[in-house]
Amino acid sequence: MADVFMNTYHRLPVTFAKGNGAWLTDVNGKNYLDFSSGIAVNCLGHNYPPLVKAIAEQAAKFNHISNYYMSDVSEAFAEKLVAACSGAGMRKVFLGNSGAEANEGACKIARKYSLVKHGPGRHQIVTLRGSFHGRTITTLSATGQDVFHKDFGPFTEGFVYVPGGDIAVLDKALDPNTTAGLLIEAIQGESGIKPQTPEYIAAAAKFCADRDILLMFDEVQAGVGRTGTFLACEAYGVKPDVVTLAKGLCGGVPAGAVLAGEKAMDVFQISDHGSTFGGNPLAAAAGLVILETVNKPEFLREIARKGEKLVSIIKGWNNPKVKEIRSRGLMIGVDITEEAWPVLEKGISRVYSIPGASGLLLLSAGKNTLRFLPPYIISDAEIEQGLEILKSCL
């Protein structure tokens, strides 16, 4: 591997040259089933023909313009995205280029909303232990995992962490005299695919509504169909004030979005916020394909069905190394009795006798959790192939 990169990633020893569908091929010609999707990014897999066509056609027009102006494709994408999220109460959108940037925008909306309406002193944002909201200084501050904080302080002040699931603690933390917003993942991804209970989400929504605290859902990983509904919050029957999206939003082209409902949609005014690459035409062209493909009831039902199939197969092994499975759609965490990373290494290092499959790309989430985020277009046969490899690895 090239030694010119900063040593920021614990990389697996493989270099890829091309991909197609749910498969990646390395520089030596070995094929791997991709159960990672670039960490939930390549939701329609690799080399998806309509996506390739849309990006190429837009690149032949222009790649980028300043946000001093509007582009036809970005306007169309924004309108379609708001429409896709309207069932959750979303009315307007700010387009950026990453999940961390989206979550920064959400925090700014919460603080300005509270300052304008309630005056100074009400600026705290509550997040959950085990959460992950990004790697900028402020989104690290929002992240409720100490492991990510080491060596980077001092942090942006005003963030309060509470354990997920404890309604009494949340009630106390959401102090209407000090709190501007609650930033929450319906399903925590980086800490092991941990869904919040319907009771907890319902209580959070009520507390926020009663106290005029903005309820903000971080759906950077869980949104855009990943859990079997377009937004994960839809399955809980709540309408947040703010939703953040990224990862799968544009199928592999960097993008992020902050969506706001009626209460928060007009908080940002001219010069309050911005993003050089936000609403990039290439991303918007790709995003239109994602929305047109994913946001259909039958497509979302298939995501849920494929997730159920994957979980059912693993449960059917009755393998004592499998301790617990947590899932929503094609967002699945499997706790195992051994460390997860060596299993990832086995997935790429061996040559398997499974017909048509040579290797498997998996993710970890913490020390002992395997994480599955396969592309939505993965077939039943490919799910079975990949799980046969996993079974061999275990």
Image: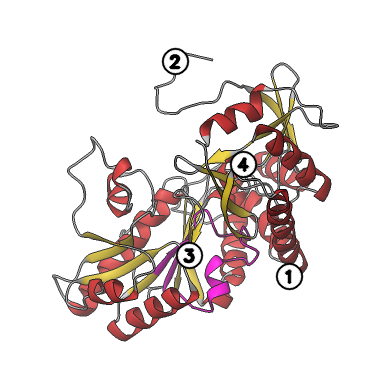
374 inside magenta stretch: no
Task: Give the residue at x 40% y 64%.
Answer: 184
Q: Name which of mark 4 and mark 2 comes first in the sequence.
A: 2
234 inside magenta stretch: yes
Q: Amino acid at mark 3?
A: Ala
Q: Which residues are magenta?
A: 216-244
Q: Name which of mark 4 and mark 3 comes first in the sequence.
A: 4
Cα distance, mark 2 to mark 1? 46 Å
Most common secondary structure along the magenta stretch: loop
Q: Name which of mark 2 and mark 3 comes first in the sequence.
A: 2
Residue beneath label 1, please?
297
Q: Amino acid at mark 2?
A: Val
Cα distance, mark 4 to mark 3? 20 Å
Q: Amino acid at mark 1?
A: Pro
Task: Say whether residue 298 is left or right of residue 88.
Answer: right
Cα distance, mark 2 to mark 3? 38 Å
Q: Which mark is residue 111?
A: none
Task: Nearest to the eye among marks 1 and 4: give it.
Answer: 4
Give the quadrant of the C terminus: top right
Cβ–Cβ under 8 Å for marks 4 and 3: no
Residue beneath label 2, please?
4
Question: Residue 255, percent across and down?
Answer: 52, 49
Q: Amino acid at mark 4?
A: Ser
Question: Residue 276, percent across and down?
Answer: 42, 46
Q: Name which of mark 2 and mark 1 comes first in the sequence.
A: 2
Question: Residue 51, percent across and down?
Answer: 72, 46
Residue beneath label 4, please?
36
